[in-house]
């Protein structure tokens, strides 16, 4: 069975934000290390919860927040998506302006994206 050209998908670059760090290289090193990225976390007080372990993403590298206007107003999930997308474009040697008017996509995996900020707002 052949796939019509209009249904093809091309992955040109990847970007990663994980508990091992910001970027593909920290992720790759973490996977190869054989060690877990799960450990104690500090993003919120876990007193009263059954666990105080998580795969928490470390603070962003210096200079990263300055590249995105409004960084302080973004949820952590939005920050992760922007940083990973920027890395994917750079690794694919694609200028962001070249995507204007073109169909593009981002695959983003998260189980609780925006939950922390939503709970803070609700409280």
Image (tube, rainbow, N blue to C red):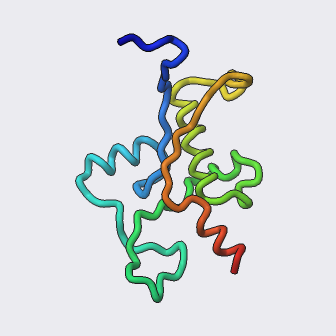
Q: Residue furthest front?
A: 1
Where the N terminus falls, by quadrant? top left
- Residue at left 44%, top 83%? 49
Q: In the shown orientation, is residue 52 left or right of residue 96?
A: left
- Residue at left 48%, top 35%? 14
Q: Residue furthest left?
A: 34
Dividing the picture into quadrants, the one containing residue 20 is bottom left
Q: Residue furthest right?
A: 70
Q: Residue furthest bottom?
A: 48
Q: How many marks?
A: 0
- Residue at left 54%, top 77%? 44
- Residue at left 53%, top 62%? 112
Q: Nearer the viewer, residue 3 or 115?
A: 3
- What percent of the width, then of the height, locates residue 96? 67, 29
- What percent of the width, then of the height, locates residue 81? 58, 47
- What percent of the width, then of the height, locates residue 58? 49, 61
Vertical side of 76 occupied by 40: above or below: below
Vertical side of 62 occupied by 86: above or below: above
Dividing the picture into quadrants, the one containing residue 25 is top left
Q: Nearer the viewer, residue 91 or 110?
A: 110
Vertical side of 46 occupied by 3: above or below: above
Vertical side of 24 occupied by 17: above or below: below
Where the C terminus falls, by quadrant? bottom right
Q: In the shown orientation, is residue 101 left or right of residue 82?
A: right
Q: Nearer the viewer, residue 2 or 113?
A: 2
- What percent of the width, then of the height, locates residue 104? 61, 28
């Amino acid at each position: 069975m052949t796939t019509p050209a209009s249904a093809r998908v091309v992955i040109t670059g990847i970007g990663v934000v994980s508990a091992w760090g910001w970027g593909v290289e920290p992720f790759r090193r973490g996977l190869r290390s054989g060690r877990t990225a799960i450990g104690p976390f500090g993003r919120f007080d876990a007193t009263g919860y059954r666990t105080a372990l998580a795969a928490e993403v470390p603070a962003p590298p210096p200079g990263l927040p300055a590249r995105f206007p409004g960084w302080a107003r973004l949820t952590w999930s939005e920050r992760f998506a922007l940083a990973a997308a920027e890395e994917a474009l750079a690794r694919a040697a694609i200028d962001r302006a070249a995507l204007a008017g073109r169909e593009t996509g981002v695959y983003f995996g998260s189980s609780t994206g925006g939950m922390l900020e939503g709970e803070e707002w609700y409280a």
